[in-house]
Amino acid sequence: MRLTNHGTRTTRTYIAETLREAIITGELPPGEKLRQDQLGAEFGVSAAPVREALAQLESEGLVVHAPNRGSFVAEITERELREVLAPLRLHLERYALDRAVESGRDKLCDQLAEVVAQMDAAARRADLRAVTEADVRFHRTLVEAGGSPQTSQLWGSIQWRLRVQFQGLGDPARRLHRITEEHAVLLEVIRAGDADARYAALDEHIVQAVATLLG
């Protein structure tokens, strides 16, 4: 994982992104110890940006720090996914979506449509990482359009843990086009303007999808 050209991103951001992807894909499994000196050698950097990257991942719930033991990849249980993370995400996105629709449904739908187009293009070229990034961007756009910084902060604190579980429970590479279709359907329901249909679609997309994956 030696540091390479990472454009305008800071060293800390680049390290955090690389480690985050490794955690989500399972390359770094739950319980794996993250040694600062070893990571510093692998990335070819000093301890400071590694420490900052680990702190960022800890704030996202992907890393836990145990006093006198060090940092480890966080373990996320199916129970936590089913009973806490998915319902909380649904509640946050429903609240944000209601606010976003009230302030400008057409503008929101135009933004989401652009993301769905990007997702579709990525699926056509079988680019799993780009589809995943577009998926995150779709929901972040939805949440931020609600105009509530607190909601956005809470959403950001759980969304990466959800993705770790989704990656472990299913095979996203085989679902690329279905992922795109699911977001296209959700977009059309939002565009139609029926609140009850919108709530049902969000529930299907977030909570029922988890139930299906968990069997």
Image (spheres, grey):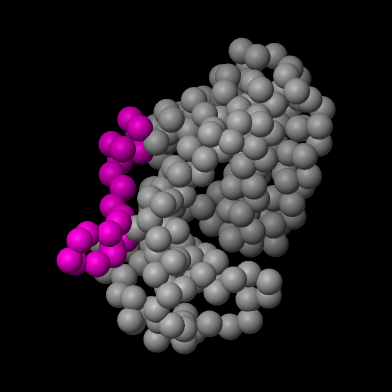
Q: Is residue 203 magenta?
A: no
Determine whether 52 is above or below 191 in the image: below
- Residue 187, given in percent of the width and then of the height, sits at 71, 31
Residue occupying image coordinates x 77% and y 39%: 111
Residue 133, located in which quarter of the rendered image? Answer: bottom right
Residue 112, located in which quarter of the rendered image? Answer: top right
Can residue 213 be seen by looking at this rendering?
Answer: yes
- Residue 201, given in percent of the width and then of the height, sits at 59, 24
Can residue 27 be seen by looking at this rendering?
Answer: no
Residue 37, located in which quarter of the rendered image? Answer: bottom left
Residue occupying image coordinates x 43% and y 30%: 88
Q: Is residue 67 magenta?
A: yes
Determine whether 129 is above or below 203 in the image: below
Along the horizontal axis of the image, is 151 left or right of 103? left
Along the horizontal axis of the image, is 17 left or right of 101? left
Say which of 18 and 167 sits in front.
18
Determine whether 9 is above or below 99 in the image: below
Which stretch appears magenta?
Answer: 64-84
Give the mark count. 0
Say which of 85 and 214 sits in front.
85
- Residue 25, given in percent of the width and then of the height, sits at 44, 61
Along the horizontal axis of the image, is 44 left or right of 117? left
Residue occupying image coordinates x 78% and y 44%: 114
